[in-house]
């Protein structure tokens, strides 16, 4: 569903203008630098640069082990199809640089379906490779001085709506089976489908992104960490046609969605200091019989919401499966869901909380929440079935399955810091002769 998100967790200094070039914060700096122009790139918005990008990465990879390499995309419009990255590598877009996704399908290689999905999202067969793709990488950075990556998604959205696709649409950025990944300080617009999809990866940093797509564009999720560990998302602004952030764990519209792809598990998610405007729901949990997996130990605090259909939404009937042969007895476990210190205005429904008969969602805690309703709110504000938990200091009063706790309590939010929160970025530079 349409959504707009300003996610403000930590404020980072992203880019500094310095004498002799540009400086930026990154997980690692690079010894060697080259420009796309050095490999035949032409930034006129018309010439294909697919081979230039591929040639650049192939040549620079030979130097990656010697202190790392960075490829600078200068000012201009650089049309390209899909290309792969390498390890110990930085892709850096200058301020007025735009990577334009080609609409020539021959420039998009076909890749296998994801192992944890079993089929494509748009069609049963394979899928188009993502615009910027990488697999089995270590230490890869995609960043810039707020340069732009434009997926030119209208071509793909039209084919999807007309059911003309035989393969699943490409994502804008997808990194698989990788460690130490940073995607930061860029503007991403009009992805064919999901924008940022790290999958089967660890130690992932997503920072300072502006993500924009029409609110009616199909499946344009903003940031979708999938089967990942140690993910840090901060300081992002997202307007999308679907979920702003969707945490996934295999396949069997909200500001933040947990599921529905979760045949694995989702655990220890911490979200705080979030502004959500005109979304269908604040935090949504989506699952169903046959999904299996679990959602546990979810902690959300300090969320402000304006113009919402639902503040809280959990559903156990999200019946989208990759094939009809799923096991209906594979029931998910939903427990330890904690929300606190939240404020919402212009709300239609306070909550829609629907567990699964015989498999209730348990351990729900909601405290210090004030919800102001729209001029024409629904009469039933808390629609609750097959759930269990408590509330404290919540307005409007919750349903009977979430009784008021006396004396008042604060729902838990972890006070310990995760190791990924304490990773300090290094200040890296682009030599002056590469800055236009």
Image: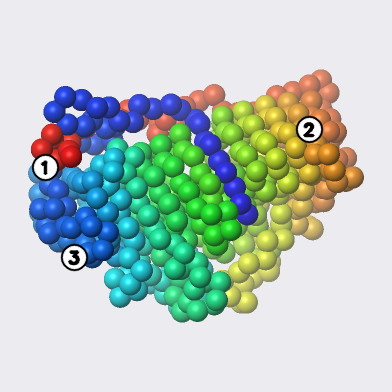
12 vs 338, left or right, is left
- State the image coordinates of residue 210 (x, y, percent, origin top left): 44, 42
Mark closer to the observer (1, 2)? 2
Figure check: 344 above or below 360: above
Residue 165 location (% of width, % of height)? 48, 77
How many marks the image carries: the answer is 3
Q: Nearer the viewer, residue 194 or 157?
A: 157
Mark 1–mark 3 Cα distance, whole angstroms, equals 21 Å
Determine crowd level at label 1: few under 14, some 14-19, many 20+ residues with C-alpha closer than 10 A. some
**Label 2 belongs to which residue?**
372
Q: Is residue 89 visible?
A: no
Residue shown at 84% from the left, 43% from the top: 377
Closer to the chain start, of discs 1 and 2, is: 1
* In-front residue for pair 321/233: 233
- Please name the residue that numbered disc 1 is placed on: 32
Q: Decide which of tag 1 and tag 3 comes sooner along the chain.
A: 1
Q: Residues within 10 Å of mark 3 (few under 14, many from 20)?
A: some
Find disc 3 in the rendering and name its residue: 51
Distance from Cα at disc 1 to Cα at disc 2: 55 Å
Displayed quadrant of residue 42: bottom left
Decide: is 433 above or below 177: above
Q: Which mark is residue 406?
A: none
- Mark-to-mark CA distance, 3 and 2: 55 Å
- Image point (45%, 35%), residue name: 234
Left or right placement of residue 430 versus residue 381 in this view: left
Could you tell me residue 70's position as x and y percent?
18, 45
**Cβ atoms under marks 3 and 2 closer than 8 Å:** no
On screen, residue 20 above or below 389: above
Q: Which of the two discs, 3 and 2, labels the residue nearer the N terminus?
A: 3
């Amino acid at each position: 569903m349409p959504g707009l998100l300003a996610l403000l967790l930590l404020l980072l200094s992203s880019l500094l203008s310095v004498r002799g070039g540009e400086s930026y914060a990154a997980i690692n700096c690079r010894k060697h630098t080259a420009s796309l122009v050095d490999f035949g790139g032409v930034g006129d918005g018309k010439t294909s640069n697919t081979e230039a990008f591929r040639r650049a990465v192939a040549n620079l990879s030979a130097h990656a082990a010697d202190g790392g390499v960075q490829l600078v995309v200068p000012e201009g419009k650089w049309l390209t199809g899909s290309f792969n990255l390498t390890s110990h590598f930085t892709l850096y877009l200058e301020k007025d640089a735009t990577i334009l996704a080609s609409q020539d399908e021959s420039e998009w290689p076909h890749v296998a379906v994801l192992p944890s999905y079993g089929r494509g999202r748009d069609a049963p067969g394979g899928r188009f490779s993502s615009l910027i793709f990488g697999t089995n990488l270590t230490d890869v950075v995609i960043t810039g001085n707020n340069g732009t990556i434009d997926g030119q998604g209208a071509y793909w959205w039209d084919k999807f709506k007309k059911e003309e696709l035989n393969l699943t649409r490409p994502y804008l950025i997808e990194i698989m089976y990788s460690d130490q990944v940073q995607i930061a300080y860029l503007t991403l617009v009009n992805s064919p489908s999901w924008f940022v999809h790290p999958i089967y990866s660890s130690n992932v940093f997503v920072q300072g992104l502006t993500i924009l797509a029409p609110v009616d564009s199909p499946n344009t999720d903003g940031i979708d960490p999938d089967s990942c560990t140690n993910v840090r998302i901060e300081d992002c602004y997202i307007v999308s046609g679907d979920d702003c952030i969707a945490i996934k764990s295999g396949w069997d519209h909200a500001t933040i969605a947990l599921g529905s792809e979760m045949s694995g598990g989702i655990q220890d998610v911490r979200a705080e200091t979030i502004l959500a405007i005109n979304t269908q729901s604040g935090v949504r949990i989506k699952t169903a019989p046959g999904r299996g997996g679990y959602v546990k130990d979810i902690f959300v605090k300090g969320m402000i919401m304006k113009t919402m259909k639902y503040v809280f939404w959990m559903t156990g009937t999200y019946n989208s499966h990759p094939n009809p042969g799923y096991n209906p007895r594979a029931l998910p476990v939903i427990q330890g869901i904690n929300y606190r210190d939240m404020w919402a205005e212009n709300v239609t429904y306070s909550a829609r909380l629907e567990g699964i008969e015989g498999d209730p969602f348990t351990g729900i805690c909601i405290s210090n929440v004030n919800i102001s309703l729209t001029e024409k709110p629904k009469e039933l504000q808390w629609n609750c079935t097959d759930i269990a938990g408590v509330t404290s200091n919540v307005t409007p009063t919750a349903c009977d399955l979430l009784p008021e706790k006396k004396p008042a309590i604060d729902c838990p939010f972890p006070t310990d810091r995760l190791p990924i929160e304490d990773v300090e970025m290094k200040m890296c530079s682009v030599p002056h002769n590469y800055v236009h």
